[in-house]
Image (cartoon, grey):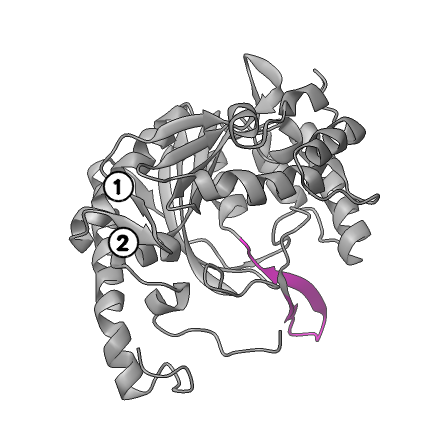
């Protein structure tokens, strides 16, 4: 590519980027056709929301609406179209997808961008395992559209046409870190920080006194597990501990884990799926716990969307998934940075 000093709009740099950008367009068109062929309805979610989402480590962009009287109402750019899509499920839609521009603060790098495209889709009345099959089909669709036999990133390769491996978090922690993860989770879903800390230290990873159970879980996941996922064939990492699945329902066979999975290719996380929680009281409790943690770590919290909780009370059983479309396009196009497949990247800001 042209030197990094050239802006993305310079003719030379744009000429370098243009083939990948055109491939991105073709993949998105192929995905829309795939969903249409399966009777999905495309919905556009409003970017401005009362709450951007209530996950502790997601940071939003804040703004405000100014009424004719001058009254100001806080609003946020959404981090996901999830709340809006679930309201549509409550309204009666049964198969829907959204190609949404979403916004996440504090995130920029080879795999992160402050504004990006998220593909979400929902199936009312379907198990979250149906979404696993969808993921396999869409990986193959993206690669076929791009004319790619392999997905490649930083020397790691994945066959996008291969059947994905299914691996539980408990199996992954045991295989790659030698840790019995679920021994630190009680039947009620409560976590034992000290038990996991001892296991993490025994595996040779750093432990500091103020680490929470979630901190330790994430450290092992990033350092020891994710580099091994999606190599040779895609990986579906499933059955997350219930404390790590704020919007997912418990698994019927084990209350310690939730119906949540993530899709990986070439060591890159591409999608996050849930068997959706539909209990508004439990959802409020989880949101409040997440916001308490956000307050502890970042000194701020986001409002809870009571309208969303009201919709959740009448929402049918469903499964839903969010896929980072730019990341998948990047892998399918053989690009090395997410900005290579974004038509107009956000201006650089101070780190």
Residue occupying image coordinates x 38% and y 55% = 327
Instruction: Choose top left, top right, bottom left or bottom right for residue 208.
Output: top right
Residue 171 can be seen, yes or no = yes
314 lies above or below 222: above
Q: Position of residue 62 (x, y in %)?
A: 65, 65
Q: Is residue 252 left or right of residue 98?
A: right
Q: Position of residue 219 (x, y in %)?
A: 64, 43
Location of mark 1 (residue):
160
**Taken as a whole, is the magenta stretch helix, strand or loop?**
strand
Of the pair 307 and 28, the residue shown nearer to us:
28
User: Looking at this rendering, what residue extends furthest in the right direction?
Assistant: 209
Q: Is residue 7 left or right of residue 172?
A: left
Tell me the magenta residue range: 62-79
Location of mark 2 (residue):
332
Residue occupying image coordinates x 55% and y 14% = 252
Of the pair 309 and 99, the residue shown nearer to us:
99
How many numbered discs, if any?
2
Image quarter in which the N terminus is found: bottom left
119 lies above or below 231: below
Q: Residues within 10 Å of mark 2 (few under 14, many from 20)?
A: many
Q: Earlier in the sequence, mark 2 or mark 1?
A: 1
Look at the image and say whether residue 292 sits in the magenta stretch.
no
Q: Is residue 28 left or right of residue 71?
A: left
Is the C-beta separation of discs 2 and 1 under 8 Å? yes
Q: Assign a secondary structure to mark 2.
A: helix
């Amino acid at each position: 590519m042209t030197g990094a000093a050239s802006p993305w709009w310079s003719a030379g740099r744009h000429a370098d980027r243009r083939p990948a950008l055109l491939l991105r367009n073709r993949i998105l068109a192929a995905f829309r056709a795939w969903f249409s062929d399966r009777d999905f309805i495309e919905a556009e979610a409003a970017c401005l929301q009362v709450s951007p989402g209530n996950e502790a480590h997601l940071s939003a962009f804040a703004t405000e609406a100014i009424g004719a009287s001058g009254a100001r109402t806080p609003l946020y750019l959404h981090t996901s179209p999830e709340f809006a899509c679930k309201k549509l499920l409550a309204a009666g839609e049964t198969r829907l997808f959204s190609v949404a521009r979403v916004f996440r603060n504090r995130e920029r790098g080879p795999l992160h961008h402050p504004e990006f495209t998220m593909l979400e889709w929902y199936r009312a009345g379907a198990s979250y395992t149906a979404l696993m099959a969808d993921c396999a089909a869409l990986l193959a669709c993206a690669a076929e559209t791009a004319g790619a036999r392999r997905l490649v990133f930083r020397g790691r390769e994945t066959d996008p046409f291969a059947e994905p491996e299914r691996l539980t978090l408990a199996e992954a922690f045991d295989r790659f870190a030698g840790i019995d993860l679920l021994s630190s989770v009680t039947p009620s879903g409560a976590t034992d920080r000290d038990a996991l800390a001892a296991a993490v230290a025994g595996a040779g990873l750093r432990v500091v006194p103020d680490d929470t159970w979630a901190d330790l879980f994430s450290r092992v996941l990033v350092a020891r597990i994710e580099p091994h996922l999606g190599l040779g064939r895609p990986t579906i990492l499933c059955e997350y501990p219930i404390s790590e699945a704020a919007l997912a329902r418990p698994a019927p066979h084990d209350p310690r884990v939730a119906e949540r999975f993530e899709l990986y290719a070439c060591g890159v996380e591409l999608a996050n799926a849930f068997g959706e929680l539909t209990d508004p009281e439990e959802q409020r409790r989880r949101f409040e716990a997440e916001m308490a943690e956000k307050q502890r770590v970042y000194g701020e919290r986001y409002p809870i969307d009571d309208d969303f909780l009201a919709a959740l009370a009448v929402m049918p059983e469903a499964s839903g998934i969010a896929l980072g479309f730019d990341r998948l396009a990047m892998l399918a196009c053989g690009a090395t940075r997410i900005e290579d497949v974004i038509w107009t990247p956000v201006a650089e800001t101070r780190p």
